[in-house]
Amino acid sequence: MSNITFTMIKPDAVRNNYIGPILAKINQAGFKIVAMKFLKITKEQAAQFYIVHKDRPFYNELIEYMSSGPIVAAILEKENAVEDFRKLIGATDPAKAEPGTIRKEFAKSIAENAIHGSDSNENAIIEANFFFSQLERF
Ligand code: CMP
């Protein structure tokens, strides 16, 4: 069954001009782009988006980083989208990511790791709703 995942190309990847190559890998892997926007989020929005991590030591650093520059947010559709997308992006720490994954190729550290992918179907829906209205999905 086809389902969705949510992704962000993060500020470091945007700054390094990796939007094009990352989108190409996403297309080549068979994901359909359902919704997409290029925007800069505020610290408050970043804090809300990552509220599940509020007790982690890296929470403040994460908020500063995610609000430090523009991002590309998108909803992607594919059979088994969440799991397949997490395989495509690789481990959170790029040093541990498999060769050929997006983080292995485009990320420099565990904090600035180039791309986000939802970790469950439930969170994919929550995260997609955070960024997109129904009118912005195709
Ligand atoms: P992501 O998996 O998209 O969502 C949580 C983010 O927190 C993660 O990507 C990283 O950007 C960041 N993160 C996770 N672990 C660490 C860490 N140990 N130190 C700093 N940032 C982290």
Image: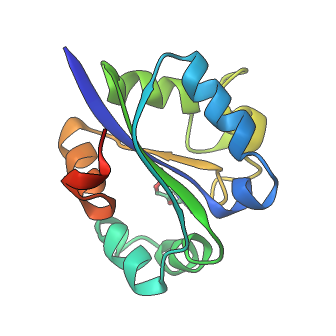
Horizontal and vertical percent position of residue 31: 45, 23
- At x 46% / y 31%, what residue is drawn? 86
Residue at left 22%, top 36%?
121
Q: Quadrant of the N terminus?
A: top left
Vertical order, 72 against 82 (above or below): below
User: Residue 90: horizontal and vertical position, in percent?
Assistant: 57, 31
Question: Is residue 97 something that shows in the picture?
Answer: no
Of residue 88 and residue 29, the one placed in the foreground of this image is 29
Q: Is residue 43 left or right of residue 48?
A: right
Identify whether 50 is placed above or below 18: below
Judged left or right of residue 104, residue 91 is left
The x, y position of residue 134, in whole percent, is 20, 52
Where 18 sits versus 99, above or below? below
Front position in the image: 26 or 89: 26
Q: How many marks?
A: 0
Color style of the picture: rainbow
Q: Residue furthest right?
A: 16
Indicate the quadrant containing the C terminus: top left, top right, bottom left or bottom right: top left
Nearer to us in this view, 46 or 77: 77
Q: Residue at x 51, y 77 (%)?
A: 63
Q: Is residue 104 visible?
A: yes
Q: Residue at x 30, y 19 (%)?
A: 80
Horizontal arrangement in the rendering, residue 123 relative to residue 20 (left or right): left
Tell me where residue 39 appears, x and y as whole percent.
53, 68
